[in-house]
Every structure is written in structure tokens, then in C-alpha cells.
Image (cartoon, rainbow, N blue to C red):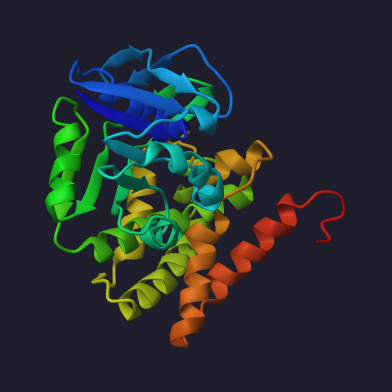
């Protein structure tokens, strides 16, 4: 029986943990800040439940066959407190996070460990600890390779479409294009339906256009009409859909703003590419979310 640890049981981590726990061949452990009574996920095909082992103290962690890091991108340090106990000589680590810097966040701290970066598209929202609504079965993409093939096999019993790609960089930047447009929802505190406003759609497309230019400079293959495709995706999905950046800002939690928009500004500067729209929306969201009078 393979031992699997999920670090970060949020919307994606909790969903993945619940689905993996449906297999009798996998022993699932969830690493969380606080205990909770099992997992309940309302999926498109009905509710699934699971009662994985829940750890709340990193000192109690033991080496696993796989560790799936599902924390927010800004909380790499928090995930690392768990990895010291979870990672042994044969452990493989998969990073299921937003952005395009999956490996860079962890490789310096895990020399010699096989790290599998993953692009996740599983729309889900956490209502409470262990209580999640999964809006679509979704997909996970990982780069081609032997470790990735083993990762794909973990999900063979689930309806989540998990597969490998020969061009992971392009896949990661395409997902970033989707995510960077979602900053508009976090700024306006309005769900996906706001994309039906033409002026909002124009802003989303401008954010994506900058992402495309920077992604191409990084080696990704991205089409000119990606912005329109992103807007069409928002418009065709549930109008009440709430992305994680929006949900975090509404709840007063830290946000993945740097991993979703700031990275475009940072990488753009590296290539001499102007990214005024992404720079502006980062500044506006930071000011809007700041306490008091908004001063730093």
C-alpha cells in the first residue's frame, strides 16, 4: 500500500485527498494546521467522503511514498516545515500550486528529491474545514517522465483527468493566463459573471496579453487569441464561480497575488517587457486589501 501525504487541505488539497482516499491501495494522510472530522466533497456526481489520517504537528510526520504540496504558493515555508519529516530517501514530491515557479520554490530545500510540478484545473471552493464543493472533475497536468507516470497512476481510480505533457512550460503559462485574469474578480469582489461586462472583458484580455508576451519570452507557446479564450471560459462557466484569489481577499486572508500577477511583472522586467496592466492591478488589490487608510 502506498503512503500519500497531502500538505494543505484547502479546496484543491481537500478534493484531491478525498478522491485518493477512495482507493483501498492508498493510505492518505492530511497535514493541516488544525484537526477536522473527515472530508466531505460535493462533486458533480454526488457527495464523496473520506476519513484520512490527520496530522497537525510536523514532528509527528513520517516518510511517505508521495507528498503532494497543495498549500498556497506564498506558503512554501509552511509546507517545508512538514517536508522534513515526510520526505525520505525514496519519497517523491508533487507540487500542486498556482504560478510558474513550482520547482524553484522547493528544489533548493530538497536536494536529490524528485519534484513533479503540476498544473491543476479543479474548480472547487472550501466552505469549512473538510467541507468542499467541487464544481468540475477537472484536470491535472504534469511534465512527461517516469515520476510523472507514477503520479498519474495514483489517480487511475478517480474521474479527475491526470495526464502528462511534453510541454509543461506552455501548460503552466496557459494556466497563469487564466489566473491573472481572475485578479479582476478579486479587485471587484464579484464572481465570474462580471466577465459578461464588455469593459471588464477588455481588462481581462489586457492582463492576459501581457502574460502571453512574457510567457513567450520564457519559451511558452501561446496563441494571440488566448485572452479571448480566457474570457469565453469565464462567461461559459457558472456565473457565481469564485476563484481562490477572490475568496481569499473576501475572507481577509493572504493572497497569491505575486504568484498570479506579480510574477508577470517580475519576469517581464527580466525580459524588458512592459506589464503596466498587471502592475496596476497588483497595486490596486494590495491597496484595497490593506487595513486602515491603506498605507503600507
Q: Nearer the viewer, residue 195 or 285?
A: 285
| Residue nearest the viewer, comparing 213 with 262 | 262
Instruction: Locate residue 48: give its quadrant.
Output: top left
288 or 13: nearer the viewer? 13
Q: Is residue 295 above or below residue 189?
A: below
The C terminus is located in which quarter?
A: bottom right
Vertical comparison of 128 with 112: above or below: above
Residue at 38 percent across and 45 percent down: it is 235
Q: Is residue 292 left or right of residue 90?
A: right
Q: Is residue 267 visible?
A: yes
User: Which residue is painted at 46% across and 57% down in the image?
Assistant: 181
Q: Is residue 65 above or below residue 93?
A: above
Residue 229 image offset from top left, x and y in percent: 30, 57
Residue 38: x %, y % from top left: 44, 13
Locate residue 46: give its quadrant.
top left
Q: Quadrant of residue 35?
A: top right
x and y, in percent, of residue 67 in the image:
34, 38
Amino acid at each position: 500500500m502506498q503512503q500519500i501525504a497531502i500538505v494543505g487541505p484547502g479546496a484543491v488539497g481537500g478534493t484531491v485527498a478525498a478522491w485518493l482516499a477512495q482507493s483501498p491501495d492508498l493510505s492518505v494522510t492530511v497535514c493541516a494546521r488544525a484537526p477536522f472530522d473527515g472530508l466531505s466533497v460535493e462533486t458533480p456526481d454526488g457527495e464523496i467522503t473520506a476519513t484520512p489520517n490527520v496530522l497537525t504537528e510536523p514532528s509527528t510526520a513520517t516518510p511517505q511514498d508521495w507528498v503532494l504540496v497543495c498549500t498556497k504558493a506564498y506558503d512554501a515555508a509552511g509546507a517545508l516545515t512538514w517536508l522534513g519529516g515526510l520526505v525520505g530517501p525514496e519519497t517523491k514530491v508533487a507540487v500542486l500550486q498556482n504560478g510558474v515557479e513550482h520547482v524553484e520554490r522547493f528544489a533548493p530545500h530538497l536536494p536529490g528529491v524528485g519534484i513533479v510540478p503540476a498544473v491543476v484545473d479543479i474548480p472547487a471552493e472550501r466552505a469549512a474545514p473538510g467541507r468542499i464543493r467541487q464544481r468540475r472533475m477537472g484536470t491535472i497536468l504534469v511534465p512527461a517522465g517516469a515520476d510523472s507516470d507514477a503520479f498519474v497512476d495514483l489517480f487511475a481510480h478517480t474521474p479527475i483527468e491526470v495526464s502528462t505533457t511534453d510541454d509543461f512550460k506552455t501548460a503552466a503559462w496557459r494556466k497563469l493566463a487564466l489566473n491573472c485574469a481572475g485578479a479582476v474578480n478579486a479587485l471587484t469582489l464579484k464572481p465570474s459573471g462580471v466577465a459578461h461586462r464588455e469593459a471588464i472583458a477588455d481588462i481581462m484580455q489586457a492582463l492576459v496579453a501581457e502574460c502571453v508576451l512574457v510567457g513567450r519570452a520564457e519559451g511558452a507557446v501561446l496563441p494571440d487569441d488566448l485572452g479571448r479564450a480566457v474570457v469565453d471560459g469565464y462567461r461559459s462557466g457558472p456565473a457565481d464561480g469564485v476563484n481562490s484569489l477572490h475568496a481569499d481577499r473576501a475572507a481577509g486572508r493572504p493572497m497569491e497575488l505575486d504568484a498570479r500577477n506579480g510574477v508577470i511583472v517580475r519576469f517581464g522586467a527580466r525580459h524588458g517587457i512592459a506589464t503596466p496592466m498587471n502592475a496596476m492591478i497588483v497595486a490596486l488589490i494590495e491597496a484595497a486589501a490593506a487595513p486602515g487608510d491603506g498605507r503600507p
